[in-house]
Amino acid sequence: MKLLEDRIRKDGKIKEGNVLKVDSFLNHQMDVKLFHEIGLEFKRRFEGKEINKILTIEASGIGIACVVAEVFDVPVVFAKKTQTKNIAGEVYRTQVESFTHGRVYDIIVSKEFLGKDDKVLLIDDFLANGKALEGLSTLVQDSGAELVGAGVVIEKGFQVGGQIIRDRGIHLESLAIVESMDDKNGTIVFREQ
Amino acid sequence: MKLLEDRIRKDGKIKEGNVLKVDSFLNHQMDVKLFHEIGLEFKRRFEGKEINKILTIEASGIGIACVVAEVFDVPVVFAKKTQTKNIAGEVYRTQVESFTHGRVYDIIVSKEFLGKDDKVLLIDDFLANGKALEGLSTLVQDSGAELVGAGVVIEKGFQVGGQIIRDRGIHLESLAIVESMDDKNGTIVFREQ
């Protein structure tokens, strides 16, 4: 998605250790006009697929998911990160390992809001090691819902997540795939799509 | 806002201890069509006010804020809850007491995304004791931005938050104000607006 790649080149900040900061428009300050364009692009890429729910994970996925959901005209459910124990049976639960925060946390979705009648599109801002998307797809599987695909705004193509998700047979669409970055001279190479 | 009050009566669940669960449409599963109507109503209530940024707090405020921001045609910034120490000088920081979770946490906003040129509308899903809105208004004050007002979807009118925020001279608009609830017979009384 050229508009997105141009925006990443313009406003993204490359930091040491392959860190790409896009918090001026994606995950701290949020450009909702761009999110709408992102929604239209996902709609185009999943054209003809029946989707009746979008599933994301807190916190930074929620804004994008909601604006995208308006384009798809479906509700959003967000998986909650939790360290508390809920009553067994009320929620679907799985564990996600966070490399950024160096810990394992549980994510949960209430059983009321995910089930066998749902045709689910996963939405998230970033795909790196794939742990969050794997966790979300496990919740979908456990609920008996159909996993239609996953839409990611930025994929770090040099990390394993994209391969893992595609190897699971999930229809993954990443709007910008970063092939490599150089924090010394500030250059970024995107995969041709 | 009648549409919202009707929806709360229809899908809200009243639990013991004055708990109102609206997670089927507001803060776990999210009805983005309703969020758009909420955006139009806030737009009407803040008609004529100059607003160029919406500030909210993770996690459940983000979705509403983003859809409302589309109606206002402005970007969103969300305050992050954190327990980690950031480098001093990079962020505005204040403390918020959570009664729900029984602890105090820090909220932060990067100094890059809030400053003296911003005319800010605060948006959140719930107003009960007012601690989250107080924290957000402190961040706005510290940044030198102008606090235009605060828009809340559901105010618990029998708790102190609304009074505290109004006493601070903040223009507060709550789309539904719950005067009282009865978990025994499932009735709910809204304040006339």
Image (spheres, coloured by chain):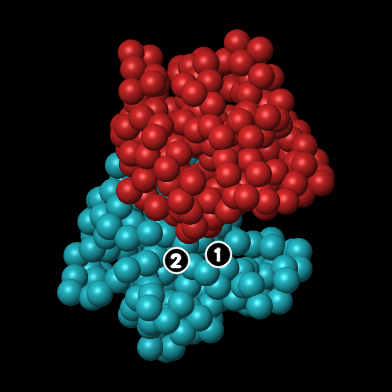
Chain colours: A cyan, B red
- Picture quarter with the C terminus of chain A: bottom left
Residue at the spot 32% in from the left edge and 60% down from the top edge: A74
Query: Image check: B119 left or right of A135?
Result: left
- Picture quarter with the N terminus of chain A: bottom left
Kind of element beneath mark 1: strand
Which percent across, then down, holds residue B119? 45, 19
Residue at the spot 68% in from the left edge and 51% down from the top edge: B184
- Give the CA distance from mark 1 to mark 2: 7 Å
Q: In this view, does B156 lie above or below B7?
A: above
| Quadrant of res B180 | top right
Callouts 1 and 2 on one subunit? yes
Q: Is residue A169 above or below residue B175?
A: below
Which residue is denoted by mark 2 in the rendering?
A55
Decide: marks 1, 2 in contact (CB < 8 A)? yes
Kind of element beneath mark 2: strand
- Which of B162 and A172 lies nearest the eye of the viewer? B162
Which percent across, then down, holds residue A28? 51, 43
- Chain of the residue on which disc 1 is drawn: A
| Quadrant of res B165 | top right
Which percent across, then down, holds residue A106? 67, 70
Residue at the spot 36% in from the left edge and 30% down from the top edge: B41
Query: Image check: B79 left or right of A82?
Result: left
Which residue type does callout 2 highlight?
A: Leu
Which residue is denoted by mark 1 in the rendering?
A79
Q: Is residue B60 visible?
A: yes
Q: Can residue B133 be seen in this view?
A: no
Q: Is residue A8 above or below residue A153?
A: above
